[in-house]
Image: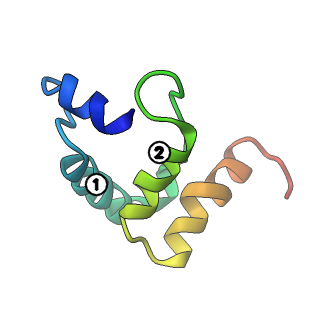
Amino acid sequence: MGEQFYLNNSETPFPNKEKAIEHLEEIIDICPERVMFGSDYGGGLSIRGHIELVLDVKLDESKLNKVFYENANKIFKLGL
């Protein structure tokens, strides 16, 4: 489903998966503490697709933890 979204929405800022990964790499490299995992599930990719997209960015463990956990824990004051 996600691949079809990219094909059907070439006018989006991320016209393909490779470009989306490229943008994510750049953004997360510049400010990893300001990126938090989220999903617009139902809009294009499944939740699994969103997770796989972030994992395809090939982040080191520290940045992955920030994106998937630490940033949300800090912003929402979860105390985890």
**Label 2 sits on what residue type?**
Gly
Q: Earlier in the sequence, mark 2 or mark 1?
A: 1
The residue singled out by tag 1 in the image is 21
Front-most of 54 and 46? 46
Q: Position of residue 67 (x, y in %)?
A: 54, 57
The residue singled out by tag 2 in the image is 49
Q: Quadrant of the N terminus?
A: top left
Q: Is residue 39 above or below residue 67?
A: above
Q: Secondary structure at mark 1?
A: helix
Residue visible at 74% across and 41% down? 76
Residue visible at 17% across and 35% down? 15
Q: Is residue 73 left or right of residue 34?
A: right
Residue visible at 48% across and 50% down? 35
Q: Secondary structure at mark 2?
A: helix
Q: How many other residues sit within 10 Å of disc 2, few (<14), some (14-19) or many (≥20)?
A: some
| Mark 2 or 1, closer to the camera | 2
Gap in Å between the C-alphas at discs 2 and 1? 13 Å
**Label 1 sits on what residue type?**
Ile
Q: Quadrant of the C terminus?
A: bottom right
Q: Position of residue 66 (x, y in %)?
A: 58, 62
Farthest-out residue, right: 79
Q: Position of residue 27 (x, y in %)?
A: 32, 54
Quarter where residue 70 is shown: bottom right
Front-most of 20 and 73? 20
Quarter where residue 7 is shown: top left
